[in-house]
Image (tube, grey):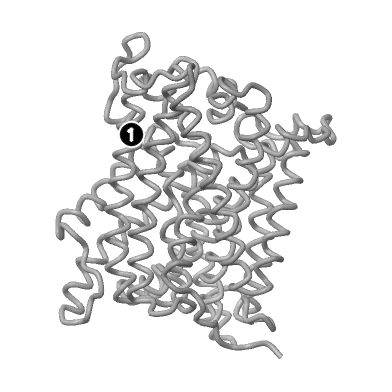
Amino acid sequence: MSSQQLNRTLGLRLVIVFVIANIIGSGIYKKVTPMAAELHSSGWVLVAWVLGGIISLFGALTYAEVAGLLADTGGDYAYYKKIYNKFFAFQFGWSTFTVIESAAIASLAYVFAQSLNSVVHLPQMLPSLASIGIKDVIEPFKDLNIKFVAIALIILLSWINSRGLKTGAWLSTFILLIVFIGIFIIIGFGLTSPESNINRAFIMETTNNQSVTISSMFTAMLAAFFAYQGWAAVGFMGGEAKNANQNIPRGITIGIFIVIALYLIVNISYLSLLPVERLEAIHASGNGVAAIEAVKTFWGRNGELFIGLLIVITTFSCNHATIVGTSRIYYAMAKEGLFFKSAARLNKYSAPANSLLIQCIWSCLLVFSGSFDQLSDMMIFVVFVFYGATALGVFILRKKMPDAPRPVKVWGYPVVPAIIILFSAGLFINTIITQPREALFGMALMLTGIPMWYWLNRKKKGN
């Protein structure tokens, strides 16, 4: 017989592990190239990483106050019900399902498969079908070998997490340790290599005297934010954390500080090994990975194999953490009749197995919908709508619940949450202007939540 309650098994250490594991994925290896292609200067790329880290930290500090006050299973979904109303909370939950986290799962699995292919060279599958679709928009049968491996990973991790949260948490801890060792090897050998020129990492001049604009900085930071994305996912497991009101905000804050420092150091290593012109060329090729090219400068083919395996392990870890966390949102929604009814049931391991299955199916379908950069940019465009809403929620809750105990209060109030609101609005507008395809797809999937809300409510009333 299945249990009807989630078990509180996560202490502060495992909360921090989940935060870091959710963040460190493919972005640490790939996203420096689109940033270089946008800014044309290694020094400005580092500025974009720092600014992205500061905004992410401000977002985390803002989120920590809300999470500390309202911690519960479902994360933002549970918070938005209390800050706004059930309709807005549902729009977040549905957007998470259709775009935000499902696209993150799909894109991480995509990079996992690309990196595995660089190591073992996966055989081509049905190349005659590759031209079906709309070129550079949607090509579902292109690179089928990569896509089928990505789908296999999503299915495997969904099954593992259906065996219970504690199993998943210890797997994350083990894998994250391997990832940290690998990243520090890259940093150590990269910065001490004869090929390294640390001064090159801080050059502010742009190639061909191209100017750096506010718009280009926003676009470059869109890439950086994908690398920082994921810290809020631990809030989805508020019902499974010990002393959730303190451990979740503390875990988020500690975790993101660690990641900011790590990202800055590893990107200095890449930029000291590869001139910005080389990074631009890697981005233009469409299939290159900055980390692989950087390590090849001092280890050759052995370096390519090493970094390929490390990316495989890292994306496995990050995807694992993402899958386990986000399935809890749909479980919380289904318990209220605002998602597919079967998602509200737990299995004998006290895991929301049906929620995991539904998430698995949709994420697999998204693998066919686009490339890694298309999926990741679409996801960041949508997620910042809700980051802004959470920051606004701090102001609303200070008025609604002025005397409620707050284990964490956002530093720099009211300036810090106000910055997040303004930045979210700026990023939203800039993406519509500079990347209309990703913005259109993201908005279209997000807005399907409106008819779904009315359909589910009508179904609820019919029962």
Where on the picture, by quarter, is residue 205?
top left
The residue positioned 19% from the left and 66% from the top of the image is 395
Residue, far top: 208
Among the 4 quarters of the image, the one containing residue 245 = bottom left
Q: Residue at x 52, y 34 (%)?
A: 186
- Residue 350 sits above or below residue 21 on the image: below
Question: The disc labelled 1 sits on which kind of residue?
Answer: Ala
Q: Which residue is mark 1?
A: 48
Percent across and percent down for residue 376 are 51, 43
Q: Is residue 244 left or right of residue 140?
A: left
Rendered position, 156 above or below 398: above
Residue farthest along the bottom direction in this orientation: 1
Residue 10, image x and y in percent?
48, 74
270 or 444, nearer to the observer: 270
Q: Quadrant of the C terminus?
A: bottom right
Q: Nearer the viewer, residue 157 or 124?
A: 157
